[in-house]
Image (cartoon, grey):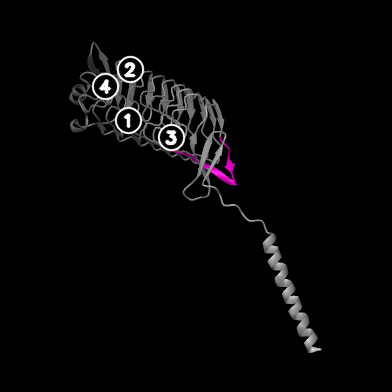
Amino acid sequence: MKMNTRLFGIIALVGVIWFSFNACKNEPEHEPVPEEVFQNGLTFRLNNERIGYVVVDFNNSASIVQIPSSLKDLPITGIGYEAFAGCSSLASVAIPDSVTSIGNYAFAGCSSLASVAIPDSVTSIGNYAFAGCSSLVSVTIPNSVTDIGYGTFSRCSSLASVTIPDSVTSIVLYTFAQCTSLASVAIPDSVTFIGDQAFDGCSSLASITIPSGIPSIGYATFYGCSSLASVAIPDSVTSIGVGAFSGCSSLASVTFMGIINEQSFSYSAFPGNLKAVFLASNGGIGTYTIEMGTWTKQQ
């Protein structure tokens, strides 16, 4: 009886092993995730973490592009360096809300790009990402964006309006330089830094509000803003750099809300003799107007 029981147990064990072996053989093998995927003229490459794909190239003359939200069960997480750069036929692109970053020069030189919707999943826009998009008329930067790179919208000569969210704390070098159609821009109070030449050559800029948290106005920040008629300098500003408002040929009124010492106030910051008049006035705080090339403080 004991022998039969033992034999039965051995047979049962062999059966279990055989079943398990064949079950493993019949399981489908998982295909390795490809490093690159090509689809509709777009090239996608695995990101550094290998948990998503990044658009790295576009080889197509299509005018309208819709980027998918996922490939191979992985999300599209970014638009890479120069991915669409120089695509002169590209007029519209749909970016999915899986994308968190737009890389350096991503759309630079897309001269026909007239509209782009940046989803609120995007947190950073790289250097010169939309530089030279000369047909781009308006852009809304979502509240999710905290980092806008150098020259991001420079030379967007048709850009007439832009919305900057409270999430942005700095406007850096060349960000809107040579945006010759930009008529007005509201800089939120969250911004505490405006870089050199940030609005250089914005010849249609007629009004600008400088936030109260800005400590300095740098080199040629508003150089050549020839339509700017008036500006108020908040009391947080303690220095104004070389050429900050040079070439602002329509500037007729400047209001200083605080004191700026002589060493921190460049003589070439404004057209004419404004610095000398400012320093000679009692405390400097007040509104100054220009007539026949001479600035005077209003009483």
Q: Mark 2 highlights which residue? A: 226
Position of 265 compared to 127: left or right?
A: left
Where is residue 267? Give x, y as percent: 20, 25
Q: Mark 4 highlights which residue? A: 246
Which is closer to the viewer, label 1 or label 2?
2
Which label number is shown at residue 82?
A: 3
Say which amino acid is labelled 4.
Ser
Q: Could you tell me if the residues under marks 3 and 1 are in contact, i.e. CB atoms within 8 Å?
A: no
Say which amino acid is labelled 3.
Glu
Q: Is residue 53 above or below residue 234?
A: below
Where is residue 114? Give x, y as percent: 50, 23
Structural distance between the alpha carbons of marks 1 and 4: 19 Å
Where is residue 57? Give x, y as percent: 48, 36
Position of 278 compared to 17: left or right?
A: left
Lower position in the chain sequence, tag 3 or tag 1: 3
Q: Mark 1 highlights which residue? A: 234
Structural distance between the alpha carbons of marks 1 and 2: 21 Å
Lower position in the chain sequence, tag 3 or tag 2: 3
Q: Nearer the viewer, residue 132 or 118?
A: 132
Structural distance between the alpha carbons of marks 4 and 2: 9 Å
Lower position in the chain sequence, tag 1 or tag 2: 2
Position of 265 compared to 135: left or right?
A: left
